[in-house]
Image (cartoon, rainbow, N blue to C red):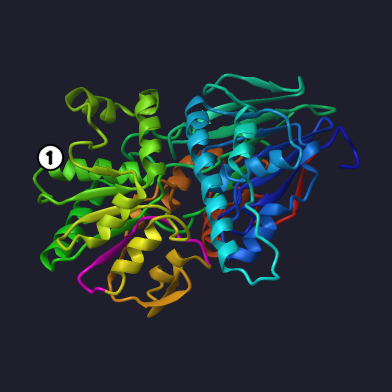
Amino acid sequence: MANPSAAAVTFWGAAQTVTGSMHLVEAAGLRILLDCGLFQGKRADARQRNCTFPFPPREIEAVVLSHAHIDHCGNLPNLVRQGFDGPIYCTPATRDLLAVMLADSAKIQEEDAAYLSKKRAVNDPCPAPLYTQRDVQATMRLVQSVPYLRPCEIAGEITFRFIEAGHLLGSAMVHLTLPGQTRDRTITFTGDLGRKGLPILRDPAPVPAADLLISECTYGGRVHPKVELLADSLGEVAQRTIARGGKIIVPAFSLGRTQNIVYFLHLLTNQGKLPKLPIYVDSPLAVAATEVFRLHPECFDEDTWDLLQKDADLFGGHLVHYVHSVEESKSLNAIKEPSLIISASGMCETGRILHHLKHNIEDPRNTILIIGYQAPDTLGRRIVEKRSQVRIHDKMYQLKAEVIVMNGFSSHADCDDFGNFLGPLAGQVGKVRLVHGEQDQAAALMQLLREKGFTDVQYPERGTTVPLE
């Protein structure tokens, strides 16, 4: 910034896309990052974007992290590797999840580098991981947990508070107060905003008014099915697949989505709506993340608290088999009878889900159940588009399994939610900038917000800077 006392925000990630959340706040001569997520997409593009920061990492004073999904936190070790050594602020539950998520991400980075090294030509350079377990350990030493609603100062100049976002265990909106020459300026960053009535977690708190509102818009133009219909829809898909002797393969993010699915399977079984069916969660990350959920019941809503009093085994240890070893994971491919396998990753780009897809995608008795957003240029998106052929591990496979998309399981706010959460702020917010969404979703939400009385609503490109006058 030319004027060190001025305040501004530059959008460097999740700008006109849904991955790699990263926004640079400059105020009082300080530079602060809101999130530092991994960009996901084509391998070469993602590698270049994730390796190269558009600012010197050493000049960042602090990172304020909204939650532990990898597209919001996954590039922190690389930031540290390149010289950042300031505090990383997050909620207590996010800190515990962060340790699990980043360790798993480093493991994937190291395994991918080893795999590509074997495939490289003799004269090609040996590929290196984006970051390693050592980088993760260095990152975790910088993490400081801050409870919801407690004011926290950064370098004695900038103050922020975490506010319940209802999207994921520990997820938070961030409300910042920046010093100005004539008056303070405020920013509200929604992070990923949740929905009312989703199981397990508390509903989002009211969104604070601010001079600048940075809001996600992943589903800004869609309306999700009612939460109460989700379990029945899941049961219908399971029964239809069982009737034809098939398997249900569920690519699910290990963090959040897997726990929600297990919760619904638990309800269906207890209600007698789901016949006895072998259910496997095949993701070491999901196993570890579920343990963190058990450690933080303070984040649960009242209904979940009530269920815990009746059945302490909320996440289904007696109902679901959690798979740990690679050998046990491979053995699932030999199962012939109907079963349900939940495996990471949610966009089908890495992890054990690839092996389950290879062994099941060409059998028309099977169902691939997509329960979350699939970014462009990912295997998950190609499956959603029902391409006749898809590439998995450098081999083409015929897509013959039934593909079912159930976006109602999303923990992102939809169009109606945004109207309810943001509508009351009309006239109280100076500028609105929409991030973390594709163009059609952003356009729909921009129109809605303008109809509600917001006068300055935009969808910034990557690298766009917004001053706070």
Question: How far from the left and from the top, in percent, is residue 394?
Answer: 48, 73
Q: Is residue 364 found inside the magenta-colored segment of the image?
A: yes
**Element carrying mark 1:** helix
Of 344 and 422, nearer the camera is 344
At 65% from the left and 64% from the top, the residue drawn is 45
Side of 143 relative to 60 (left or right):
left
What secondary structure is the stretch in magenta mostly built from? loop
Tell me the residue at 40%/46% (across/down): 254
Expressed as whole percent of the image width and height from the top left, the position of residue 447 reads: 55, 58
Quadrant hosting residue 135:
top right
Identity of the amino acid at label 1? Answer: Asn
Q: Which residue lies furthest to the front in this view?
A: 122
Q: In this view, does 137 lie to the left or right of 402?
A: right
Q: Nearer the viewer, residue 290 or 305?
A: 290
Label 1, residues with CA under 10 Å away: few <14, some 14-19, many ≥20: few
Magenta range: 363-376
Q: Can residue 140 be seen in this view?
A: yes
Residue at 37 percent across and 62 percent down: it is 355
Q: Name the residue under label 1.
A: 270
Residue 271, quarter of the rendered image: top left
Q: Quadrant location of the C terminus? A: top right
Q: In which quarter of the image is the N terminus?
A: top right
Please tell me whether residue 165 is drawn above or below residue 16 in the rendered image: above
Q: Which of the 4 quarters of the picture holds residue 24?
A: top right
Q: Is residue 59 magenta?
A: no
Q: Which residue lies furthest to the right in this view?
A: 2
- The spot of residue 169 in percent (x, y) is 43, 34
